[in-house]
Image (cartoon, rainbow, N blue to C red):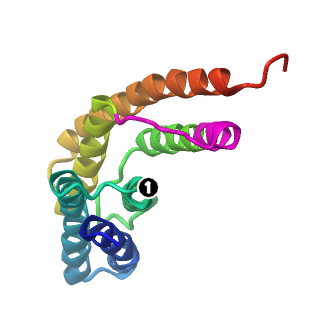
Amino acid sequence: MTLANKITIARILLVPVFVIELLNYTGGGGEVHRWIALGVFLLAAIGDGVDGFVARRFHQKTELGALLDPLADKLLLVLGLIILTLDTQSRLDRIPLWLTATVLARDVCLVLLMVLVGAMSHAARVRPHWTGKVATVLQMSCVVWALLKWDTEWLFWLAVAATAFTALSGLIYLPAGLAMVRAKAPAGG
């Protein structure tokens, strides 16, 4: 168990705290819940950069880390986006449904593709693309922007950019995954 993996596990454990505090705020108010949700989200988001840095700097890249790190990102972001897309009792600006739907569609397609590749070859390796990293940063920015209750018009444009980069990254990852499937497909079938 490396330090990088411990940081990633801590990020995963922060997700339920974030969700509970965000639901407490949207359900009944209490500014303290919004600020705790924001603080926990930022801590988990910053932890994403920290665990990556520690893994690279101290040569702590592991198979477990390669599995848990994207899981931590997806749990935090997808749950945050879903909750902020739902009716938040007019307490927070809503994240546009089309952003959340794009993120979910891309992630479901990629997970299904990786399961297929993994089942066929037992060695599915996907290298992160810069468009996926930009999409993640923009998605995180949308959540933070909504939690800070900043200008709605800017939230809209952040969501447009996040949707565009999410879709673009999916269009880049899908052909690579399909190429892996074709390369590992049994001959004659």
Residue 66 placed where, x, y %?
40, 53
116 or 18: nearer the viewer: 116
Residue 54, image quadrant = bottom left
158 or 119: nearer the viewer: 119
Vertical side of 182 occupied by 167: above or below:
below
Magenta stretch: includes residue 134: no
Q: Which residues are magenta?
A: 112-128
- The quarter in which the C terminus is drawn is top right
Q: Amino acid at mark 1?
A: Glu
Residue 90 placed where, x, y %?
33, 64
Residue appearing at x 35%, y 28% in the figure: 164
* Residue placed furthest toward the right: 188
Residue 85 placed where, x, y %?
42, 54
Residue 149 placed where, x, y %?
18, 59
Kindly identify which residue carries mark 1.
63
Considering the numbered disc 1 on the image, is that residue within a helix, a strand or a loop? helix
Magenta stretch: includes residue 123: yes
